[in-house]
Image: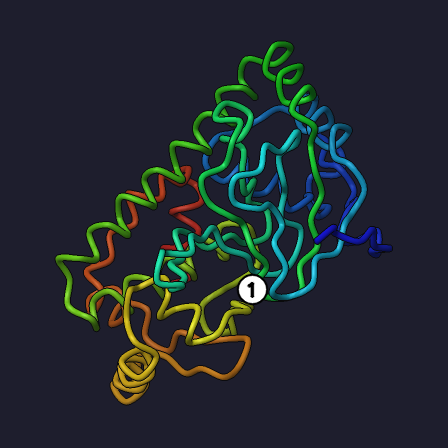
Amino acid sequence: MQAKSAIVPDTVINQPRPNASLATEPMHILLRKLNSHHEISAEEQDAVLSSLGPAISISRGKDIVSDGSTPQHTTVMLSGTACRYKILPRGIRHILAFQYPGDMTDLYSYVMKKLDHAVGALSDCTIAQIPHEQIAALGEQYPNLQYSFWRDTMLDASISNNWILGGGRTTAERMANMLCEIFVRFNSVGLASLGKPIPFNATQQDLADALGLSLVHTNKTLGALRKEGLIQSQPGTFQILDWEGLCTAGNFQLQYLHLRSDIRADLADQES
């Protein structure tokens, strides 16, 4: 189905761009994501924002990009939660990755051309698009920006590697590790902090499809983490009550998310 154009408040799409005299003003969510793992200049940031198309609304349950399609653009998440997923022959959905605000959900489509999976909205989402010809032009004009895009796709690969390791973890470790990752990814773009609810707009079934668990097993595992005083949750959000304990329960290692050192220090300050 086709996405619908949306009217979105300026605070969502066109937040003031950072410069030397306005360093404290809010940064666009895409720039926050790119800058969280590699610093890009003010000129490069302006170039990225000028390449973004208008905001588009996607309803929960709709595809953002279809399996087998050949998109001519890269999708940027502005709000909501989405996922990369594949429908297996028996009709079972397997979630390959979660996508959050700031993520470029299919940057690799510029190179791979035809997608071998779909990107779907797990909640009502707002997205924008960057045409592939603009991706090429940005990379040619700004080598540092090209490196940032490349690094972003390598980060996706690193996250996939960590998910694969879930096969060697206990169910509780898999769940705790996933919740730690979700928090850090939201935190790195300024959308979460310890002691406050995290806007993870996905269901227990979505978690089950990502972790390869049954819904009953997922519910029991979350209940066990709540009973241990590590988290509390309600529909649409969850909150970490004991960060150190949750990291220990999930054997969570921050390094695979490849954040800048100052972002990692920021998180360490929140822990203290």
What secondary structure is found at the residue carrying circle 1? loop
Query: Observer-nearest residue: 105 or 32?
Result: 105
Above/below status of 109 relative to 90: above
Q: Position of residue 59 (x, y in %)?
A: 69, 63
Query: Observer-nearest residue: 156 or 141?
Result: 156
> Residue lying furthest bottom in this view?
227
Query: Observer-nearest residue: 269 or 72?
Result: 72
Residue visible at 26% across and 64% down in the picture? 247
Above/below status of 115 relative to 192: above
Q: Where is residue 94 in the image (x, y as percent from the top left)?
A: 37, 59
> Residue lying furthest front in this view?
89
> Colour scheme of this structure image?
rainbow
Residue visible at 55% across and 76% down in the picture? 236
Q: How crowded is mark 1: few (under 14 residues within 10 Å), some or many (20 or more)?
A: many
Per the image, the residue denoted by label 1 is 122
Residue visible at 62% across and 61% down in the picture? 80
Identify the image quadrant of the C terminus.
bottom left
Q: Number of callouts in the render?
A: 1
Q: Where is residue 268 in the image (x, y as percent from the top left)?
A: 36, 55
Lateral position of residue 40 relative to residue 160, left or right: right
Query: Observer-nearest residue: 228 or 163?
Result: 163
> Residue lying furthest right in this view?
7
Q: Where is residue 163 in the image (x, y as percent from the top left)?
A: 28, 52
- Using the rendered image of the protein, determine whether residue 272 is visible from the camera's viewpoint: no
Q: Label 1 amino acid?
A: Leu
